[in-house]
Amino acid sequence: MGGVRRLLAACGLLAGQAALAGTVLDPSLKITAEERYDDDFRLAEGTGGQLMTKLSPRFGLEVKDPRTTSEAFYSADLLVRHGSGNASLDHRGGLTLGHELSRRLKLDFTGKLFRVTDPTSLPREGVARSLSPTLYGQAKLSVTERATERLDLKASYAFEGAKVYEEGRAPGFVHTPSVEAWYHETRRLSLGLEYRYQGFLFENQFSHAQGAFAGLRYRLTRPTTLTVRGGPVLYTSPEGQSGWLPRVAVGLERDGELLDLGVSAGHDLVGASGFTNALWADYASVMVSRRFDDRLSAHAAASYFRNGRAPNEGAFRWNESPYVSQGYAVGGSVDYRLTREVTLQGAVDRIAQVGAGDVAAGVDLARNVLAVRLVVSAW
């Protein structure tokens, strides 16, 4: 009993210190129960679609003090297929951290980790197109300094990794340090410069790329911002051969009271696909959210991607190539808040991702999903 008392006393002391420091702990639990019809590509060939039940508890913890904001979460997805009786369990976790080192210096970190049997649930399209389970993670650490009233300087390091659980399949990694500067010409217009290095590692083969880019950020309206980046990238293969490719990125974001909009498109060099060292990638996406009142909202999204061998094999030809993979996804949902803690959702999704050659496992991950969800915010 003496040990328990000392432990409780220590916990009380720590809690008192946290309170004195102004630290606020906010735990949360959200449970999503879903019934769906799914043409699941993991079903046996010829089985067709099935009704499925999905249960997803999500545990979160938010920590705040006057200089720091952080949030961590863990979520599990239990999927039970009624027709075949098979079940699968996926895992997701993440951490975000923002800390003000001083009035001008800020530290930010984001990290996410996924262990899934469904690669279409990963945050980046075109990763690990396989029927096998996949481990995928991404993280980014950055330091931003307000050098002057108009100039921001930023140094970042990003990491990405993918491991497909197939015999003889090695993991792939990307290491991306970068530095950038943004000059705020006016309240609406900012001009930027960036240098980026990428190191790709797959099956003990290392390749790398360097790029220099210019950027423009312009606030079209109070809630709407346009960002454009572009410049050349020099890629060097594991064999020492070099080639150039362009990097272009266009983004439009609107965060309004009733309407949110996100549009992005571009061409870039990526890695950590789970199947090869580095890939060129075309991408485009549109996301729209509309809030009608405090209870009712609607959401829609569409995306498309193409990728192939780096630096640009097949990138600028639209005819079929054995080394180019592509896919798209479209979907929509409607949310209705029954009470403060309970929300009812209806959703429909169409996903088509087709692998080819060494870019993927040569599998077709096309599927249709029709789902009804009940989301309960327990605390």
Image (cartoon, rainbow, N blue to C red):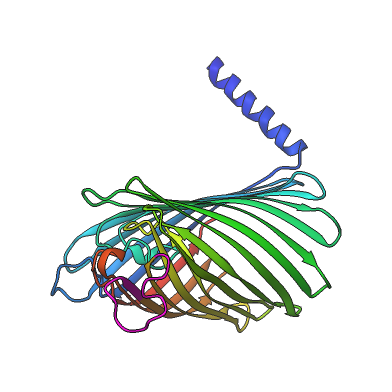
74 with respect to 187 (left or right): left
**Would residue 47 appear left or right of 309 to someone viewing this image?**
left
Residue 138 pos. (x, y %): 48, 53
Can residue 112 be seen in this snapshot? no
Dominant secondary structure, magenta: loop
- 242 relative to 346, above or below: above
Q: How many marks?
A: 0
- Give the camera-side residue of 245 and 300: 245
Q: Is residue 154 left or right of residue 292?
A: right
Can residue 53 be seen in the rendering of this structure? yes
- Return the x and y of residue 340 as percentages of the image width and height: 58, 68
Q: Position of residue 326 (x, y in %)?
A: 35, 75
Q: Image point 76% across, 70% down: which residue?
A: 190
Question: Residue 211 appears at what percent x and percent y?
Answer: 57, 61
Residue 22 shown in magenta: no
Of residue 230 and residue 109, the one placed in the foreground of this image is 230
Q: Residue furthest front?
A: 241
Q: Name the residue located 60 percent from the left edge and 19 percent from the top edge.
A: 6
State which region is magenta.
310-326
Which residue ends up furthest to the left in the rendered image?
A: 46
Image check: 220 left or right of 339? right
- Magenta-drawn stretch contains 313: yes
Q: Nearer the viewer, residue 113 or 201?
A: 201
Query: Please, which residue is most extreme toward the top here?
Result: 2
In what quadrant of the picture does the C terminus appear? bottom right
Q: Quadrant of residue 218?
A: bottom right
Which is more toward the observer, 325 or 46?
325
